[in-house]
Image (tube, grey):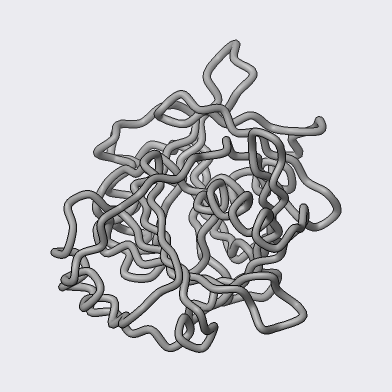
Amino acid sequence: MQNTGNFFVVTTFSNVLFEGNPTPVCILDYEITDTAMESYAKEFGMPVAVFVHKPKSEAYYSIRYFTVRGEIPACGHGTLAAADVLFNRFGVHGSNITFRTIEGIDLKASKEKDVAYIEYPRYGLKDFDITSALMEALNIDAFQTHFFCEELESLFIELEEEENVRQLRPDFHKLKNSSKLLKEVVVMCSSQSDTYDFTLRSFCPWIGINEDPVTGSIHSVLGHYWGEKLKKDKLIAYQASERGGKIYVSPLKNSVKLGGNVKFMFEGTLHLES
């Protein structure tokens, strides 16, 4: 057996074990094949496994994200988890870390006290034709507004009542077959709580995740949408999944800063057959 690095399982967007989004972060000694990364992700069996490697003579860390179905280009909670592991488990010093994704996008990560932050580019909104099949799959009768993010292949639907968001019970088989243009549907509404500004849930059966426990990258869209709607430059979102999680969101001029608590769970050593 050949060592390839270490893995750390942390929960993101929560400081409580077994809440938030459980995330395996693999810090590689050297590059491994896509097949190996996909195999590790299947063995972990969690929403997304993250693989980090620092190319020689480069200032950035290469970061890749794999679900049990294969690679995805973006994952906010995975990036947040990787940053926390490098800061706290590997003693990476400096004010920030730069990650480079498979699409060549550079993401800046930082840490303030016990909260890890990443900065995402600001993504735009487009119109989208919602079919009756998609509405039926979501079990939604009516909504306030909706829009589409091409970069994330994500549809956003705003409902009027928070309780409607929390009680949604989609038919994931029907949802997956309702559109070939989507990878994710986010259902949201303004929060009735004094603790949070908006509440959301995220459904991703197209990539093998029926409901994402807590989502990061979508706030590159939601930060400016809710910031402008609520006239606030600092927001707190709550993802009302079974595990639940809290996201700090700050819309900036051309980007969005999002953050959350990260809680260490366990660690181990990665091996590949030599």
Callout count: 0
Quadrant containing the C terminus in the rendered view: top left
Residue closest to the far top: 57
From the viewer's perspective, tell me whether residue 8 is left or right of residue 4: right
Can residue 7 be seen in the rendering of this structure? no
Residue 189 position in % (x across, y down)? 54, 73
Residue at the image position 60 percent from the left and 66 percent from the top = 265
Residue 204 position in % (x across, y down)? 33, 62
Quadrant containing the N terminus in the rendered view: top left
Residue 135 against residue 72 in the figure, above or below = below
* Residue 137 lies in quadrant: bottom left
Residue 217 against residue 124 in the figure, above or below = below
Residue at the image position 56 percent from the left and 45 percent from the top = 79
Residue at the image position 51 percent from the left and 88 percent from the top = 163
From the viewer's perspective, tell me whether residue 233 is left or right of residue 42: right
Residue 120 against residue 195 in the figure, above or below = above
Residue at the image position 64 percent from the left and 33 percent from the top = 254
From the viewer's perspective, tell me whether residue 266 is left or right of residue 193: left
Which of 80 and 190 lies nearest the eye of the viewer?
190
* Residue 273 lies in quadrant: top left
Residue 70 position in % (x across, y down)? 26, 47
Can residue 144 be seen in the rendering of this structure? yes
Residue 258 against residue 20 in the figure, above or below = above
Which of 86 and 121 lies nearest the eye of the viewer?
121
Which of 146 and 210 lies nearest the eye of the viewer?
146
Residue 192 position in % (x across, y down)? 66, 83
